[in-house]
Amino acid sequence: MPKYVYFFGGGKADGNESMKNLLGGKGANLAEMAGHPGLRLPVPPGFTITTEVCTYYYANKRKYPPELKAQLEKTLGMVEKIMGKKFGDLSDPLLLSVRSGARRSMPGMMDTVLNIGLNDTTIVGLIQKTQNPRFAYDAYRRLVMMYADVVMEKAEGIEPKGGKGIRKVLDERLGEVKREKGYTYDTDLTADDLKSLVAEFKEIVKDRLGKPFPEDPMMQLWGGVGAVFQSWNGKRAIEYRRIERIPDEWGTAVNVQSMVFGNMGDDSATGVAFTRNPGTGENQFYGEYLVNAQGEDVVAGIRTPAPINEYSKNDQSKHLPALEHLMPENYKKLYAMQRSLEKHYHDMQDIEFTIEKGTLYMLQCRVGKRNGVAAVRMASEMYKERLIDAPTAVRRVQPSQLVELLLPMIDPVAELAKTSIAKGLPAGPGGATGKAVFSSEDAVAWAQRGEKVILVREETSPEDVDGMHKAQAILTSKGGMTSHAALVARGWGKCCIVGCGDMEIAHDNKSFKTKSGVVVREGDWISLNGTKGVVYEGSLTLVDVDIEHNAAYMDFMKLVDKIRVLKVRTNADTPADTRKAVTFGAEGIGLFRTEHMFYGEGSEKPLFLLRKMIMSKTKEEREVALNELYPFVKNDIKATMEALDGYPVTVRLLDPPLHEFVPHSPDKMAALAQELQVDVEELKKRAENLKENNPMLGHRGVRLGVTYGEVTAMQIRAILEAAGELIKEGKKANPEIMIPVTCTVEELINQKKIVDKVYPEACAAVGLKKIPFLYGTMIEIPRAALTANRMAEVAEFFSYGTNDLTQMGFGFSRDDIGGFLPDYLNNKILPADPFQTIDQEGIGELIKIGIQRGRATRPQLKVGICGEHGGDPESVKFCHRAGMSYVSCSPFRVPIARLAAAHAALEEIAAAEKPAKRKPAKKIEAKKPAVKKPAPKKPVAKKTAPKKKSPKKGKKR
Ligand code: PEP
Ligand code: MG
């Protein structure tokens, strides 16, 4: 008979940690904590209904397997036995909680019901047993609220009247009673107040939802179980799964557990803690708690939680008593438990605990979410502490999390000059600037029209997830470091400030006012320093961080580099970008776009000469212009090559269609006409002749070199002489000449003749017998990939231009796809934007065919990628599997690509059953001292080229 219900408690458990797929993360961890001989923590007993039941439920028209009822009842009996109480008992009733628990944690995404088992008769027993009617009625009103919201409204799919859900209605009623009675806190409500509130609540529920609150405990329990399964397909859960890419088929488990109470008086408390600081990664026990409260109070952010220890104090909580002083014995036990949990799981744990009348219970533990900064620090330090080995450390950080370490922060100089308008808790690091919006819907709508927004809320709820995702940052007036906003932002690595009590949001939800009287209205710019938790008026400049001084990051990346096989280069066109990329670990340039030297600051003169060349009528005229242009091109290439200090530099010959360079302003036209000694009308005619209907498929790339061999010759001379001069100066240079937009080997042969002619001249010019270089091509036209065996007869290397290859492979214009891509994504016609992540099914096949055919001709063929995909983690992994030698991406993506390459190597080891097609990734033992890789010498550039913009419309760098 299939087993659908797994018991835990009293030092025993049917399941264990390895059963996450079946029991969900929470269920597996409860079983492990309760039953593992090395832990046996005081977990309130309970049971887990498996994810298989969820799958069954959805596959069978929302019915349960027939065996479930008997199994549940039998296991409930075991729980009753340990607790010494009976569910539904009139004198001492056992109360239960029902919680969801998917394989991967989905914080706040699914629903929980507490205090199940209370009704008008069992409450009498509870009062008698506890001698605490206030507590009992408080538990009862919470049950009615949660049950009505989760089971009777959400799970039933009832759309609340006027958009206001039952929980909000009941909450407002509670607020009214507090106001009527002149109370400040919920805790001011007396037993009688709560008793009549329960009665009122039930009336409201019946009235609004058309059904009475069920008194039968068993009905309550089944209602709760069903609601958890229903919530798996609730809007919030689906939304979260889409963002986090959690498969719909996984389903959730349901955890039913005995209630223990943190709200039984001043000897009771409840809290949330982390075995290390999830914001910074520091190895310090960190957490918050509330005396006389239930768990939801900590997370909901209604009361400011107190720190569990001195370390956890912050500006908002520094005046509150720490648990370590208030309940030292229990703190000591808690401290020991969290140490053993971290040691047991070899990872930072997020734990929930409750102290009921002086007895400590561990309610839950799970791997704690952390931001990128903390993830890197923890991985690096846990490796040093020998808690984990190097591959585990590397796997612990997702490539996209590294972005946070490279995140811009508010310019410290600009920040010094500003006075902050409010201060809150630093829940997500980095800086952000944007226009204040006050609802999730506005955040989505404003972001969709291209505005940068900061979402400002009292507190966030799972309904806000979409807006939170679209916003640059999140700012809440309530909530602690474990509130919903903080948890979600931390998971995403988003700048976030919570608990900003200095601001009060206006009733109309269109502005906020700070304590000092500053009013910020919807649409006003604000800036956040999420690392410090401070808010500024206006838009402050953001600057880059100094990554080289982050020791944890540097140590972590050493591990990464020891594991990866794929090399990582950068796409850079200026010495400044190149130097930045080298500090990020670039091992060469995979794409130097020559045309970029004609754009941006300082490009006026070379651009003028280029235009002169383009508008020349005869070859002779063109050669005059080319000779004038030559020194600019050579010096630009030389400065960048010098900054690379011997790492290879792939210089691509001129690619864009020439008309892109034609001047438009009358004075520029006049100046050019004068230079060429023709009238403006004649010049306009020449410009007109350069126009094409489909320039991206027109006279560009190698086609220019075929028509104007002298343009190729000048560039080859510049590359070879730049390299030769550096070598003469005792420096290193390794140029790779790359021909763009080729479709046949004949083009390569044609251009190679020019190279062969220029080469001896260049050697003579610099006084060298030979100048090292490679001759290769971009593969960016499908025909080139398909005829790669021929291309490799001449090309010594291939570099995949996946921007154009995607454009020509799909037939989607890379400049215009934005107009219809959302339709393709929304209708699931495409799984993702193919210009961002390689379409492995189609374009990926072209890449693989090209590599295979190319290497059939030339086994040592070097192959790389220089399209935008070179910095996308999934695409990098694909490139590793396809057997490429390197990926090349923009400087900021270099660390991300390095880590993705290491992950790819580890995945290859994990899939070792397949015969390795390539050199396997190096195996690293735990705590093997990292060997320093010879770092490239600090580059010294002669010229700092200005920032330049891409000449081709719509291209990203
Ligand atoms: C490409 O096509 O992928 C490429 C790198 O070249 P560009 O974007 O300059 O066309
Ligand atoms: Mg291209």
Image (tube, rainbow, N blue to C red):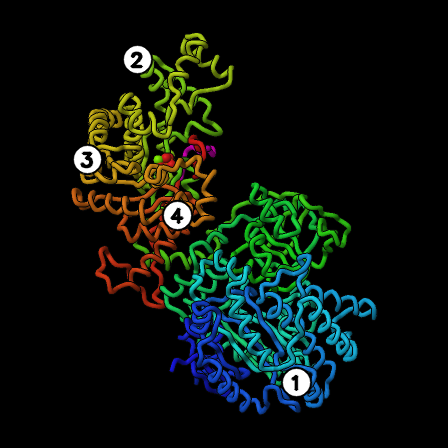
Which sits earlier in the primary sequence, circle 3 or circle 2? 2
Q: Which residue is mark 1?
A: 357
User: Is label 4 in a helix, a strand or a loop?
Assistant: loop
Going by the image, does 709 lie left or right of 526? left
* Sequence-first tag of 4 and 2: 2
Q: CA distance from mark 3 to mark 4?
A: 30 Å
Q: Position of residue 374 (x, y in %)?
A: 50, 61
**N-terminal-most mark, 3 or 4:** 3
- Could you tell whether 547 is left or right of 361 in the image? left
Please tell me whether residue 683 is drawn above or below residue 926 in the rendered image. Answer: above
Could you give the CA–CA distance between mark 3 and mark 2, rounded to whole angstroms? Answer: 30 Å
Q: Amino acid at mark 4?
A: Thr
Disc 3 vs disc 4: which is toward the camera? Answer: 4
Report the magenta residues as a range. Answer: 940-949
Residue beneath disc 3: 794
User: Which badge, 1 or 4, comes first in the chain's sequence?
Assistant: 1
Q: Which secondary structure, mark 1?
A: loop
Q: Residues within 10 Å of mark 1 (few under 14, many from 20)?
A: some
Residue bearing mark 4: 837
Disc 2, SS? helix
* Above or below for 825 versus 145: above
Image-quadrant location for residue 688: top left
Q: In the rendered structure, which disc, 1 or 2, sits on the residue that comes first in sequence?
A: 1
Q: Are marks 3 and 4 in contact (CB under 8 Å)?
A: no
For disc 2, the marked residue is 620
How far apart are labels 1 and 4 at the CA level? Answer: 55 Å
Task: Give the label, 1 or 2, closer to the camera.
Answer: 1
Please tell me which residue lies in front, 832 or 355: 832
The residue located at (31%, 58%) in the rendering is: 905
